[in-house]
Amino acid sequence: MNAPSTPRRYSDEQKAEAIDFCLKENLSCAKAAQRLGLHPSILSRWLRQYRIDQGEALPVDRGLLNTSERDELIKLRKEIRELRREKDFFKLAAAHFAKDQLPQKGFG
C-alpha cells in the first residue's frame, strides 16, 4: 500500500509562468494544463486568483479576496488564535491565584 503523497508545492514563479503560457497561447485551462502536466483545476485556480489580483475578476468572482487581502486574513486569523490561547492561559492563572487568596474552609 502506498503512503499518501503530500501535495506538490509550486513556486510563485512557476505559477506565473503557467498563467503567462495559458494567456499568451490563448488556450483553455484544460489544454494548457495538459501541456504543462498540471491538473486542470490547479491552473484554473491560479488563473482565477490572477484575474482577481489584476482587478479583472469575472462577475461570479467579484467580491473575492485578492492575494494580499488573503495573506492578511491568514495572518489575522493566526494572531487571533494566539491571543485566544494567551487569554485562556491568563484565565487559568487568575483562577489559580484567586483560589490561593480565598480563606481556608473547615474547622479552625
Image (cartoon, rainbow, N blue to C red):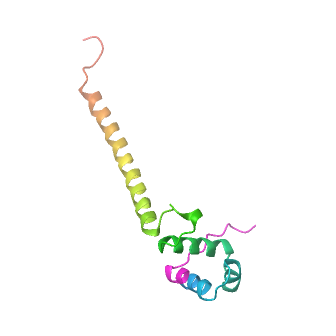
Give the residue at x 48% y 63%: 65
Give the residue at x 69% y 86%: 35
Choose top left, top right, bottom left or bottom right for residue 96. Answer: top left
Residue most toward the top?
107
The C terminus appears in which quarter of the rendering? top left
Residue most toward the bottom?
25
Which segment did they paint magenta? 1-16
Where's residue 44, x and y in %? 63, 73
Where's residue 88, x and y in %? 37, 41
Relative to residue 54, is residue 79 depicted above or below? above
Relative to residue 73, is residue 97 depicted above or below? above
Helix, strand or loop for the magenta stretch, by majority: loop
72 or 93: nearer the viewer: 72
Give the residue at x 53% y 71%: 49
Choose top left, top right, bottom left or bottom right for residue 92. Answer: top left
On whether residue 2 falls in the magenta region, the answer is yes
Choose top left, top right, bottom left or bottom right for residue 72. Answer: bottom left
Give the residue at x 64% y 85%: 26
Where's residue 43, x and y in %? 62, 76
| Residue 86 horizontal side relative to residue 74, left or right | left
The N terminus appears in which quarter of the rendering? bottom right
Residue most toward the right?
1
On whether residue 11 falls in the magenta region, the answer is yes
